[in-house]
Image (cartoon, rainbow, N blue to C red):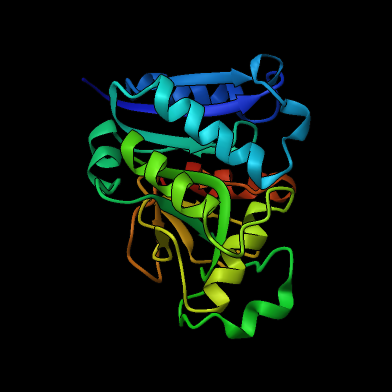
Amino acid sequence: MKDLLVIMPATQEYGLMRQYIGQLEAAKIDYHVARLSEIPNANAGGTHAYALDFYRRCAQLFGNYEKLVFSDAFDVLFFGSKDEVIWKIPSTHVLCAAERNCYPDPSLASLVRNTLPWRFVNCGLTAGTPESFLKWVEKIEVHPLYVPDGLNQAFFNTLLSRGEHLGELDDITSLFYCLYMDAGELDFDKGMPINKLCLTRPNFIHFNGKCFHPGVLARREETLR
């Protein structure tokens, strides 16, 4: 049994991807780049059904790993160690990244009962065991609110508005930190990310596509001097 694998779908190398892969390699973390040209029905990549099929295929293909992380490829960076990540990933359920933004229906925001800013699901980062992912997919597919042609974040945030969640939301940013709408809680301690509000040390920093700010990394560099 191998220990940890990071899986990222990508059409080509772009954005932060080279730096991200270099960080994973430095931490001796295995990774797999799933080229969309090799994935069946990749043209349906925006649907919830496609996402679930991707989780299922990868969980089956990489069932020889103890823990899996599914990750975006172009807008994520990694900090920390393999042991930290393995320790933070639950063995009994799937952990989803959290963000401040209630996408795609912001009208649901007031219905989500959580006092922390990271109240909503972000599907760019998930983690669990292969078995947990397989069970998670099965539960989603039989849920009465599941819409195969719908959007995964719409499904999860609707569940949260009803007081449900299939899995667990990383609302204290223990493993994942999504920067979109960040209000300054993300800081660095000797180059390592720290959430000053929750006093957690996330390992995967998600720049959420267009919100990449070089200033964030500049602040990190200052703590290394």
User: In the displayed structure, does residue 177 sit left or right of residue 152?
Assistant: left
Seen as rendered, the residue at the extreme top is 38
37 vs 147, nearest the viewer: 147
For the point 70% across and 64% down, the residue is 103
Image quadrant where one finds the C terminus? top left
Quarter of the view holding residue 29: top left
Percent across and percent down for residue 137 are 48, 45
Residue 159 appears in the rendering: yes
Quarter of the view holding residue 159: bottom right
Percent across and percent down for residue 7 are 49, 28
For the point 53% across and 60% down, the residue is 143
Percent across and percent down for residue 25 are 40, 19
Q: How many marks?
A: 0
For the point 40% across and 71% down, the residue is 197
Percent across and percent down for residue 27 are 33, 25
Image quadrant where one finds the N terminus? top left
140 vs 95, nearest the viewer: 140
User: In the displayed structure, does residue 154 sit left or right of residue 143?
Assistant: right
Seen as rendered, the residue at the extreme right is 43
Q: In this picture, is 139 found above or below 70?
A: below
For the point 22% across and 43% down, the residue is 87
146 vs 33, nearest the viewer: 146
Residue 129 appears in the rendering: no
Quarter of the view holding residue 168: bottom left
Q: In this picture, is 30 found above or below 223?
A: above
